[in-house]
Image (spheres, rainbow, N blue to C red):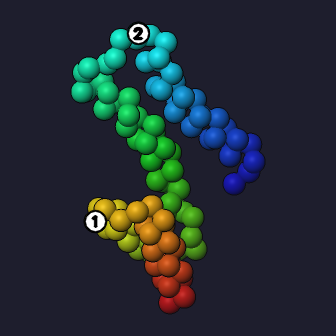
Amino acid sequence: MEMRRVLICVALMAIVTYIPRVLPLTLFRKPIRSKYIRSFLDYTPYAVLGAMTFPDVFFSTGSLTSAALGTAAALYLSYKGKGLVTVACAAILVVYLAELL
């Protein structure tokens, strides 16, 4: 991946993450009581980050099979409530073992 694309992605992610967090501070003086708006503002950065990075997961390894296995392992462990480090390490391990075979 070329450096220009990486910098553009980082800048876009920073802007997309920064705007929803700053707008409530500048536009609303009172606390936001709507559960819908609060959850939207809380989860928007994660949704955008996931949408930007998830497609690249399948092209980050030597084969689509190992990438799919690593993704499946990560999804399973995250569904079970495991921590970020555990999920990442397990996915890396599964991809490594799949690449060995």
Taking the image as drawn, is residue 66 in sight? no
65 is higher (above) or lower (below) than 53: below
The kind of secondary structure element at disc 1 is: loop
Specify few, some or many for label 2: CA neighbours under 10 Å numbering under 14, 14-19, or 20 or more.
Answer: few
Residue at the far bottom in the pictured view: 101
The kind of secondary structure element at disc 2 is: loop
Specify few, some or many for label 1: CA neighbours under 10 Å numbering under 14, 14-19, or 20 or more.
Answer: few
Q: Residue at x 48, y 83 (%)?
A: 98
For badge 1, the amino acid type reads Lys
On the image, which quarter does residue 80 sit in? Answer: bottom left
Q: Residue at x 50, y 90 (%)?
A: 101
Please tell me which residue lies in front, 76 or 56: 76
Residue 97: where, in percent of width, then height? 50, 85
Check disc 1 and report the residue beneath it. 80
Please tell me which residue lies in front, 65 or 77: 77
Mark seen at residue 29: 2
Residue 46: where, in percent of width, then height? 43, 42
Residue 91: where, in percent of width, then height? 46, 71
74 is higher (above) or lower (below) than 15: below
Q: Residue at x 62, y 41 (%)?
A: 9
Q: Residue at x 25, y 27 (%)?
A: 36
Mark 2 vs 1: CB contact within 8 A: no
For badge 2, the amino acid type reads Arg
Q: Nearer the viewer, mark 2 or mark 1?
A: 2
16 is higher (above) or lower (below) than 69: above
Residue 8: where, in percent of width, then height? 67, 38
Instruction: Name the N-terminal-most of marks 2 and 1.
Output: 2
